[in-house]
Amino acid sequence: MKVALAVIALGLLAPTSVWGQAAPGLAEYQAAIERELGALAAGTVEVTLHPDGTATVTYHQPDGRLLGRTVALPPGRDDAVELVAMLAVNLVRDQSSGWDVSAAAGPTAPASPEPAPAPAPAPPPAAPAPGAAAATTTPAPAEVAVAPVSVSLLWPITTDSFYGAPIAARLGLHVIAGGGYGVHGVSLAGVADVQRGPVEGVQAAGVVAATSFQVRGVQLGGVVASVQRDVIGGQVAGVFALSRGLIDGIQAAGVLGAARQVHGVQVAGALAATEELRGLQLSVVNLAGHVRGVQLGVVNYARTSEGASIGLINIVRDGLTELDTTVDAAGTAGVVLRHGTPRFYSVYGAATTRERDLGLVGMGFGTRLSRISRLSLDLDAMAFAVDGEVLATDLALLSRGRLLAALHLGRVAVLAGLELNVLVAGDGERGDALHPALDRSWRSDDVTTRMWPSASIGLRLQ
């Protein structure tokens, strides 16, 4: 049984334009939705066209529940029809993709396919037959025109009223605060610029730059830059930058940057946060749901990751966590915590010599080169600070590169590895403090460099 359709425009007739271009008629939306849906379960799909260039698609399920989404209509006539039709398909076929819009979706059709009866003595209207489409209309929105110039002192004291309709300006000049129904060029404001339409160009304000639609170009706010939907291009703010949709380009903020998705670069002075990262996230603290790129900061957190988190503290909640205990040929025993993803993980470790007269504390990073069945091969690099009176020097830094093979036996693995050690120490270092074998030494002024190979064995807990 096909889904009955109720296509509603907020006017006596459907809008004649969408952001300055000819808008599709109701019949086009209706035909496209019927073509995409085909024969599906009973219910009602309702399309509501709003004056601000958006459309709300609501699916009235047979049990009375409502699911819906609101989207910005693209400027192209065919693109608008296709977007609405595909959204209707998503809501009907995948009911989890919408949310309850019973209180916020605007005018809605009755939950039941049977319309409510009209007041007496008029008879109630007939319900649409299964598989048929019904179209209704209500008061029309004013057309959004594109004007060359918009000038204002303080909204709503503006030249927009001379046009007799809401406008999207090619050039907006606002002394204190201004706004409109979009920007098709440049809009400048001394304090705040707030648009109720898409920004295609440049929006700049001394304090707040905001739009309830998307930005295709550059948005600049001295303190706050806010976009309710996507940013295609750049978003820059001195303190706080926010996008509730996709960043496809760059988002930069002096303190805090937040976006639902980042497909590009997100930079913030203190905190950067996104639900999905496909690119680079750069801040002191980085937070992400899923990472398919690189987080670079002091503290990095991701729920899941297929990329890399590089910093002092890296946490991947659903990532790799392993604990190694090893001893090398010279008798240095240590423990290493490995955390991150197989592609890139952080390692934190501590060790002591067999006489326990030296202590080593260090950190580094590594990657899992391969895993075949029960065998895995890791390559990691660590830097250790070495301390102990036996060194007789204040400078001692040990760098270690290690190739480590593991045989996995359930939650325990047996380890064997090869190491290359480089010790850089001051003039008072004792050559045998770490018991190197086959070592070579170089001396330059009051710095001694020693390099030697070693081997290690151990166990791993997973």
Image: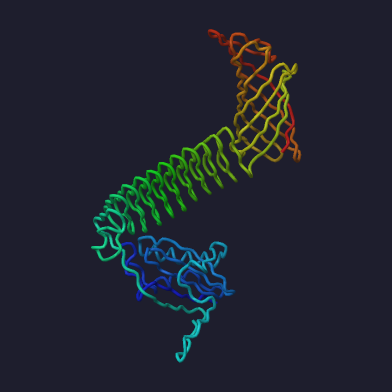
Say which quadrant the N terminus sits in: bottom right
Residue reaching furthest to the bottom = 121
Q: Say whether residue 442 is left or right of residue 336.
A: left
Up/down of 103 relative to 346, above or below: below
Q: Position of residue 385 (x, y in %)?
A: 62, 21
Q: Say whether residue 166 is left or right of residue 307.
A: left
Q: Say whether residue 258 is left or right of residue 142.
A: right
Viewer-side residue, 119 vs 301 = 119
Up/down of 146 relative to 400, above or below: below
Please tell me in which quadrant of the rendered image residue 367 appears.
Answer: top right
Please tell me in which quadrant of the rendered image residue 220 appears.
Answer: top left
Say which quadrant the C terminus sits in: top right
Viewer-side residue, 402 vs 15 = 15
Q: Position of residue 295 (x, y in %)?
A: 52, 39
Viewer-side residue, 380 vs 208 = 208
Q: How is the image coloured?
A: rainbow
Q: Position of residue 332 (x, y in %)?
A: 71, 20
The residue at 32%/50% (across/down) is: 201
The residue at 40%/48% (across/down) is: 225
